[in-house]
Structure formats: C-alpha cells, structure tokens
Amino acid sequence: MRNGLRSCALALLVSATAFAGQMVNGVLMVDGKPFYPLGSWNFDYTTPDDIARLGMNTSFRGGPNTDAAVEQFRTFMRDCAARNIQVTPYLSYGGDGVVPWPPDAVRAIAKLASEPNLLAWYVGDDIGMPHLPGIEQTVNLLRKDTPTIPTVADYIADKTPEAKTTFTKFVDIRCQYSYPIPNEPFSKYLSFFDQQRQFVGDPLWTWVQTFMWGGTGRKFDVGAEGPGPVPDPEQVRLLSFAAINRGVRGLLFFPHHELHRQPELAAEVALTCHEIRLVSDFLASGTTTLNLVTNVPDVNAAAFTYGESEVVSVALFKPAYHRWVDEAVIKNLTIECPWPGERLPQAMLVATPDVTTCVVERGANPKTIRITLPSLELAGFVLVTCDQGQIDALRKGVDAIPAQIARLIVPAASVQARKTAEVVWQLGLDNLYDPSIVMDSMRAVERCADAVNQGKSADAVRAWRDALRASRNEIGTVMKFAEARRDRVPANLRLFLESPYGLRNIHGLASVPASDDPWRFVDRWMIAGPFPLEWDGVKSPTPPAGFVKAYPPEKQRSRATTFKTVDGSSGWMPATSDLSGLLDFSSHFTTTDNVVCYARCRIIAPRTMEAKLSLGSNDGARVWINGKNVFSWSGTATGGRPAKPHQNEIPVQLTKGPNSVLVKVENLGKDWQLYLSAHDPAGELKFDT
C-alpha cells in the first residue's frame, strides 16, 4: 500500500529485508505494510501508465516461461515499480489445459523473485478437479525457490476434501468469483463469498465484473461485441463494495482492455480505486464486523477496525442487479457500529469530491455508536476516528482525487449519456417534438467538459455525477415503462425485459399499452387482398367504387378459396399484429397504393353483451360484426390519415360464443395499417382467427 492512511500501527513481524509480497498472519504485506491489491488482468499491450491512470496498484499478466522471456518481463516489472505498481505473473494453468508448467519453466519464472515488486504467483485460473495435482506440483517447485512469495489461484472446482486440501495448503490467497447476471439478487452475490470463506477460509480476493460474459450477452442480445457493453458504472461500483462488505481483501477488475473500450466504466473504476486506497490499511488488515444494523433494509454495511479507528463500508444493494427503477440516494441513513471507546468519535463520509460530516450518537447497545449519514449515493466509506490527523489526511486525499480522474470523466459522462439515450431512442420514447427525457444528462456532460477545460476538477466530478444520475433516471423511466407492459410481452421475449439494453429486441414496445390498460388489441388475423380501390386521386366525400364494392372475401371465408387480386391469384393467409396491436399490410402485399384488403378474426364472448370496439386505420375502413356493417369511413374525403390506436370507437352487440369480425381497409398510398381493440377491463373476451 502506498497511499493509505498511515496513522495506525500494525503489530505484525515482518522481515527487515522483505520487499516482495509476503503473507504475515493472514495479511498480505508489501514493504512491511498491509497491502490491498487493486488491479486488472492485462496483456502485453497494457502499459504501466494504463494501469496507474485508473488508480490501480497491481498488474496481473501472463508470466514468462523461458529465460529470455523472463528478462523481457523484468523490464515491464521495473516500469511498474517506477509507478508503485506491484506485479502478479500468471502461470497460465487451468481451464481446458490440464498439463502444468514443466519444472524448467517454473524455475525460469521463479528468477523474477529478485524484483522488489513481485507481489504473488498466480498459479491457477479456473481450477477444476483435474488441475489439483498440477497446482500442488507447481507450488512445491515455487516454494523451494521462492519460499516467501504468496501463491494465488481462482477456484471453481467441486467442494471436495481434495479441493479443500489444495486450496488451503498450497494456495495462500483464494480468488473467488461469481458474476451476477441481470435480475439476480445481490443477496446471492453476498452469500457466495460467505460460502467460499466457510470452505477455504481467508483471505479472499475476487474478480469484479466490468463486462457481461459472452454467453449471457448473447442470450440477451445486447452489445455490438456480443458480451457488452452491458453494465453501468453504478453496478461496477456496487459489485466492488459487495465484495468489500464481505471482507474480501483484494479486487481485480476484469479485464483491462474492456475498460479501454468502455470509458464510462473506467472512470468509475478509477474513482473506486482511489477511494479504496485512502482506507486500504483498514480493508487489508482490519478486524471485520459484517452486516451492521441499518434503518434501510436494502443497505448493507461492514466495519473494519484497525488500531483505534475504524472504516465503515456501506452500500445500497437493491434486490435486482440490473434494474434501476428507483432512486439510488438514501437520506438520513443510520448505521449501528461497534465502538469500544468512551469518547465519541467523528465520522466522515467519503463522497468525492466532498467529505461529509456525519452525526454520531451513543448506540442502542453498549460499546456501539449510531452514525447518521445525511445522504448516501450508492456506496461509500465512513472514517470513524478520534484522530484529527487521520481526518485531515482523509480530506487531503479526497481533495486530490478529482484532478487524478479528470481526464477520464468527460468521455465517461459522454458515453454513458449516449448509451442510455440510445435505449430511449430505440424504443421511440423520445422524439424531436416531445419534451426530451435525455436532455438533463446531455447538459450535465456539457457542464463536465466546461469544468475540465476551466481546470475546476471538483466541479467537473460533480457534473459527471449529475450526468450519471440523469442517465440512471432515464434508464429508470424506460424500465418502469417496460415493466408495466410485462404481461403484454410474449413469454419468449420476456428475457429481454431483464436488461434495458435488451429492450430493443422487443419490437414495438414503445407503443404497447400497459398491462392494466382496459383495451385489448386483436393480434391474430386472416387477411386477403389486395383489390382495386379505384380512387381518382381527388378528395371527395363520395367513397371510391372499390371501397363500397363487395369483393369475394366478404362472402368466402374458406382457406381453400382463392381470389383474383391485384397481385395475382391468392387466398386467405395468416397475419400477426405487433405488440402494440399494429397490423401492417405493407409487409404482406406487393401492391400497396390505391387498393383495399380484408382482415378477419373472431371475438368469443362469454354471454350476449354490449361492447365497444376501437379502430385505428390508414386510411379508411369498414367493419362488419356477424355480417352487419357497424362502421364505414373513407379517407378520400380528407386525403387519408395515419393509423393510430383509438381513432374511432364503435359500439357493438356481441352474442354468446364466437362473433365474426371483418374489416376492410383502404390505402390511398404510403403506409397501410390497422389497429382493432375491444374494451375488456375484466379480461372476459377471447380472440382467434
């Protein structure tokens, strides 16, 4: 740890000659101080500057397996050392490969132990049961040549005695990971770490998701690249705090090149890393108290006691991972914390670019205090101390963060605002003529850019947060809209409701009525046509001959019947309305100007009853119920109209059982569409063809 609070002393014995990472009493140490790794998996095109600009202190990279490669890797390590970055080389073993590194390769990479910033050996990735003997073989070789360097592996094997032996005797640090997918509860993610700790103990590191795994991304059909971009900055931050709140003692953001592609996530990762480094002594080696009592059920908090002070990590975990349908700001949040001292401490909330003073009172139980946070947005750290020097150091550290992340936040704000605006635009919920729901985020981006240009880094961070709040509100608006229509979305499309970025796959969703709308649209039809309208192109109150002429479909209902149409010989064929109830004839017929067609269905009533139908058409239409003409209007009197739901309301009499409905729709030119719905608040009516 390079930039943490230094006022506390850790009573641990460390060799005076230790430079590389060491485990001492379960705590990872670097240069005799507790260390909290913050890094990413990266390749040879990721530079030390790339790592440092995100506030990270650790690089995770595939390691060399020959003497020549070791010397090249050594150059990278020394570039990292100049930037206070520790290095953990991968030994590239696990997954599909079950053959461990040969002894010569292990001895070659072991020569890197002379570098003072070698943090640990990553000896296994995606380790299953077949890999366990290879892990033990490799670690035995490394411990012979580099006995003090810790080993790390991530574990997916079954919970067996053999796995427990390998991961407790041969692996010093377990990297456990579980990536929540949209709509999974955070409680499942939190309990995952508890289960892993019960099995293999402390310490645990974790990978933090910065993109959606390819299989999940393809399932939801989101993102041009398949896997992403899916997560929003808030979720990356909350995944980090979820791990912290379970006592996980290191975060690895996965992978670094994805963060280059997604600047909206990179900026949030940088902010999170910089804030963690301010309190990393506490997180790396403090005594943990999990699941502190709060006055808000969705808020989780944990205390890390270190010396005579503590840090409280607090986060708002909504039940679902990928839904932002509520505000992410909690007012007047209270937390019951352990505090053995007689003197009431001060409590300072890190809310970059600010440090907020919190109210501290005696708690409900002895040796506890109650902290009241005036406002918490998503997640943050609270320093609880009587040491004014620690408070001053915290304020100074927070003051420095805006300048450290200023170059990241303008592209971050811009990309996130654009990303969420595209969701709104793709659904058709925003257009040139209505008040824009994306304007707030766009204006916040402009304020962020202006503040950066003026060198006002703190104001730039505030504007960036404003842009994210506005984007979150946009997503919330969209998700509320979509959720209100869940029952109207076919079962095979409902998976796309789990992610705002998947909603574009539900075509017509913007026009779908809410589930509690009393009007139910006909969605299955039989259609026939086209037939001549015989309109001369002149506006006239007299309907064209083809509008009133009885073409064969008015009498012949058999599927076996064929008609002579403008497009040739054809018969009745099935057609389906979209989710909004819109039946588009243009996609079924070749000739679409100066023509008419027919559409028929049945309404099945539970009894004889009076009912109301609602019609929208482009252009005019005639409607028959059980052979009786109940509506007739030709668009030639006005030059036509665009189709919209509920343009005409038609009172009808339905008999018990099936009622035949026949609609004749004219088209003067261009679009050719039909909406037909029945007023059915009790859901008594059924439709078929």
Image: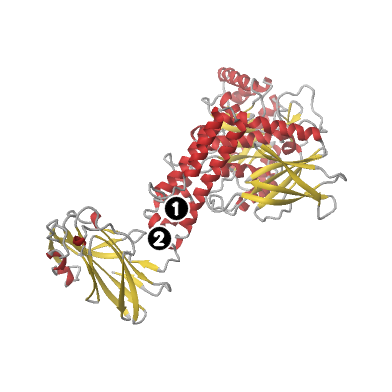
Tag 2: Cα neighbours inside 10 Å, few (<14), some, or many (≥20)?
Answer: few
Q: Write down the quadrant of residue 669 in the picture.
A: bottom left
Q: Position of residue 535 (x, y in %)?
A: 13, 59
Indicate which disc residue 490 carries.
2
- Nearer to me, 331 or 328: 331
Q: CA distance from mark 2 to mark 1?
A: 11 Å
> Looking at the image, is mark 2 or mark 1 earlier in the sequence?
2
Q: Position of residue 253 (x, y in %)?
A: 58, 36
Q: Is residue 174 toward the left or the right of residue 499 in the image?
A: right
Report helix, strand or loop for mark 2: loop
Give me the residue at 48% from left, 37% from top: 415
Amino acid found under the numbered disc labelled 2: Pro
Q: Position of residue 647 (x, y in %)?
A: 31, 64
Amino acid found under the numbered disc labelled 1: Phe
The answer to whether residue 581 is above or below residue 81 is below
The answer to whether residue 104 is above or below residue 365 is above
Give me the residue at 50% from left, 49% from top: 475
Indicate which disc residue 496 carries.
1
Q: How is the image coloured?
A: secondary structure
Q: Can the viewer see residue 357?
A: yes
